[in-house]
Amino acid sequence: MTAVNPIPMPPPLETLRTVYLHPGQIFTATQPLLVSTILGSCIAVCLWDEATSVAGINHYLLPNDPVRGHSDLRYGNVSIERLINEMLGAGATMTRIVARLAGGASILGPGSSSRLSIGDQNVAVAREVLQKHGLPIIAEHTGGQRGRKLVFHTGNGCAYIKEI
């Protein structure tokens, strides 16, 4: 498991509206909210542009969509591209967007020696797409064998993670 600057859960005094993000969904915001989701082998990519206070998050289940093309947000390659486009449409600038990653656990144990687990494949797709767009990953809590609860604060770009 890789952990870079893990951040504790937010204090219970937080009075912001909470939005629950289901698998296969994307959410962007220009005002402070708390977006929560539960991740196993799934990945959430949290994007933040501090200058414009534009935030975005996705939740995808599988790495690549081999059949349906570019419309199914359950797949990482589709979901991350759409999230970036929604961020730009909301006023973010590509050179200022930073990313945080969470999820990608191997819930059923490590993959076979010849094949990566779904969680590992999901993490690899996130890194690949973000690198293609030149978006730096400034924090990451991925891998391992436990799920996570993620709360993303769209007002400051922080991601709070608790293993479950």
Image: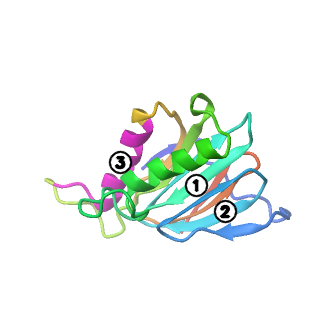
The front one of 71 and 32 is 71
**Proximity of marks 2 and 1: CB atoms separated by less than 8 Å:** yes
Q: Point out the tag, 2 or 1, that comes first from the N-terminus.
A: 2
- Say which residue appears at 41% left-offset and 65% top-offset: 74
- Residue 125 is marked as 3
| Mark before the other along the chain sequence, 2 or 3 | 2
User: The magenta stretch spans which residues?
Assistant: 115-130
**Residue extending furthest left?**
114
How far apart are labels 1 and 3 at the CA level?
Answer: 15 Å
Cα separation, mark 2 vs mark 1, equals 8 Å
Residue under the point 83% across and 62% down: 14
Q: What is the distance, in whole Å, between disc 2 and disc 3 at their CAs?
A: 22 Å
Mark closer to the chain start, 1 or 3: 1
Q: Position of residue 110 (x, y in %)?
A: 27, 60
Q: Give the amino acid at mark 1.
A: Ile
Write down the residue under mark 1: 57
The stretch drawn in magenta includes residue 145 = no
Mark 2 residue type: Val
Question: Does 70 appear above or below 20?
Answer: above
The residue carrying pointer 1 sits among few (fewer than 14), some (14 to 19) or many (20 or more) residues within 10 Å by Cα, namely: many
Query: Callout 3: few (<14), some (14-19), or many (20+) C-alpha neighbours within 10 Å?
Result: some
Q: Secondary structure at mark 3?
A: helix
The percent coordinates of residue 80 (x first, y second) are 46, 50
Kindly identify the amino acid type of the residue bearing the numbered disc 3: Val
Q: Secondary structure at mark 1?
A: strand
Question: As displayed, is residue 140 above or below residue 60?
Answer: above
Q: Nearer the viewer, residue 33 or 94?
A: 94
Q: Residue at x 71, y 37 (%)?
A: 50
Query: Which labelled disc corresponds to residue 35?
Result: 2
| Residue 58 can be seen, yes or no | yes
Does 147 sit left or right of 49 as displayed? left
Magenta segment's dominant SS is: helix
